[in-house]
Image (cartoon, grey):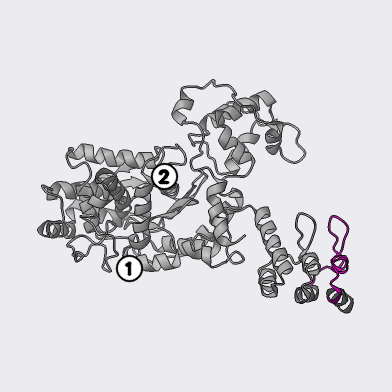
Amino acid sequence: MNKASIVASRRSQRPESDPGPDPASQASQPSRKLTESPDHGLYKLFLEAGQTELPVQGLTERLRAAGILSDDPRAREIFDRMGQDKNARSIATSSEFNELFALNPSLIRRVAEDSLVIPDWDEFCRSIALIFQEAANVVDGKVAAYIPELASVPAEKFGLGICSVDGQRVHYGDAKDPFSIQSISKTVSYCLASEEVGPQALHAHIGREPSGHSFNAITLDPKRRPHNPMINAGAIVSCSLIKSEKSASERFAHVLETWKRLTADGDVSFNNTVFLSERDSADRNFALAYFLRENAAFPKNTGISATLDFYFQCCSVEMTCESMAIAAATLANGGVNPLTNERVFSIETVKNCLSLMHSCGMYDFSGEFAFLIGVPAKSGVGGGIMVVVPEVLGFCVWSPPLDEHGNSVRGIEFCKLLMSKYSFHNFDIVTGAEGEKVDPTRRKVSVRNARVVDLCWAAAKGDTKEIQRLIASGVDINGADYDGRTALHLAASEGQAASVQYILQNGGKRDAKDRWGNTPFDDAQRSGHLAVAEIFEHIQG
């Protein structure tokens, strides 16, 4: 299986939106009974080795191990019911299991079958913890000082939240501490403006190109528009298009409500002190706004002061890494919140937003980030970076010290370390780097089996160079297919003398038997490949 087919299989392995029943309907039906009984095999999948009955806590422990947390609206009632029984040694009867299964059949079945997007969540989390610890050792950078309120945030703060498109979640460090999202707000402002006026009308006012300048540069593109919506000028214009006919309070309530929907009613708040601090030090943004008005970049009748206040409010939203990760996962999931199953933004809006995040989301470091990291992201001078790995996960990393571009130093380091470990870069697809990087969306067994099949296929075709590459990348030279046939069996059967010789010289077992009891030498003789049979005789094991 090649790399492209692996990535394509992510779509086929995971339903487009499959988080289970609507949480709101669950709340109104607490006594709902089983409508579709699980087979006994599913029940057995939750049993540990040696168990014949399921401990009452076994199901919730399995959910947690898969990344499904107790505050997940899809599983909250399951955790609540299990929490009522404090005796962890109690046994869940078959009927009790059936009642729990009925609360969210799809989710429980997928957990049991390890078919969530990251099947080995425990191992993934252990690896992420090590990467997080390594990034924590970075002590470079300076906390943003041009907004006075941000300068008081402790430099040692470091948090990380991750959420997969199947709602698997984990967090590390200061992930529960609220931070000022600042320019990360530009993503939602763009999406809201696009949903309201449409992408064509929106981009009549804002371009789609990297500016090549700093995020607050007083410059426009040749059409006298802000270069893109991920810099200050573009975001100010985006804000001017959002509910422009409404009052200031209604406009901002609309933004907060959208963040709430993106985060499954997560920790989203407004910091008035940051807002006042930002407004009091906003000479540059006022200059930008008047420059925009001079060049007719705003819609007609746009009020400068009202638009800037709205922009400052959007930047003064506070969020935790935990909550921001859910928002990132919603974008990774095509605009559908993985915890609530609510579509927040259209597919087209998300596609356009991710494209702009990829090319323009990291200030004047955007090109380097796209080259090194290779996924959409948006940073803010509050120290946060929201990163989207489409169809897999979203994460938010936060650490206040910034580099010369205005990006979190520890955040950038974490992203680099993550991409060196996992095949998340957009173009890992075409590099064939399976042996160098890990694809956490694939099961270990399926990865191992697929690579053994690749080896057998190369042997049958006599592709010695591919055999060399696969063995060098760690594939077991004596691995067997479903019939117990090794690469040596296949090479011998097809009369591939060079491949047989190479495999024998590099540890291939001449006495390996397939399910019919035949050795590779037997296959060579039976197929009439006498030259190959002679190789077995000349190269002694």
Q: Is residue 368 left or right of residue 75?
A: left
Amino acid of disc 2: Ser
Residue 440 picture location, percent across and down: 57, 55
**Residue 43, placed above or below residue 491:** above
The rendered magenta stretch, by its main secondary structure, is classed as loop
Q: Residues within 10 Å of mark 1 (few under 14, many from 20)?
A: few
Q: Tell me if I can see residue 407 in this picture.
A: no
Give the alpha-carbon distance from disc 2 to disc 1, as whole Å.
27 Å
Q: Residues within 10 Å of mark 2 (few under 14, many from 20)?
A: many
Which quadrant, please, contains the C terminus?
Answer: bottom right
Secondary structure under tag 1 reads loop
Residue 143: image tag: none
Q: Tell me if I can see residue 56 in this picture.
A: yes
Residue 404: image tag: 1
Which quadrant, please, contains the N terminus?
Answer: bottom right
Is 518 within the magenta?
Answer: yes
**Residue 456, placed above or below residue 102:** below
Residue at position x 73%, y 31% in the image: 53
Q: Looking at the image, is mark 2 or mark 1 earlier in the sequence?
A: 2
In which quarter of the view is residue 5 placed? Answer: bottom right
Residue 323: image tag: 2
Name the residue nearer the viewer: 177 or 185.
185
Residue 79 picture location, percent across and down: 55, 32
Residue 383 picture location, percent across and down: 36, 57
Secondary structure under tag 2 reads helix
Task: Give the magenta range.
Answer: 507-531
**Residue 327, placed above or below residue 37:** below
Residue 61 picture location, percent across and down: 62, 38
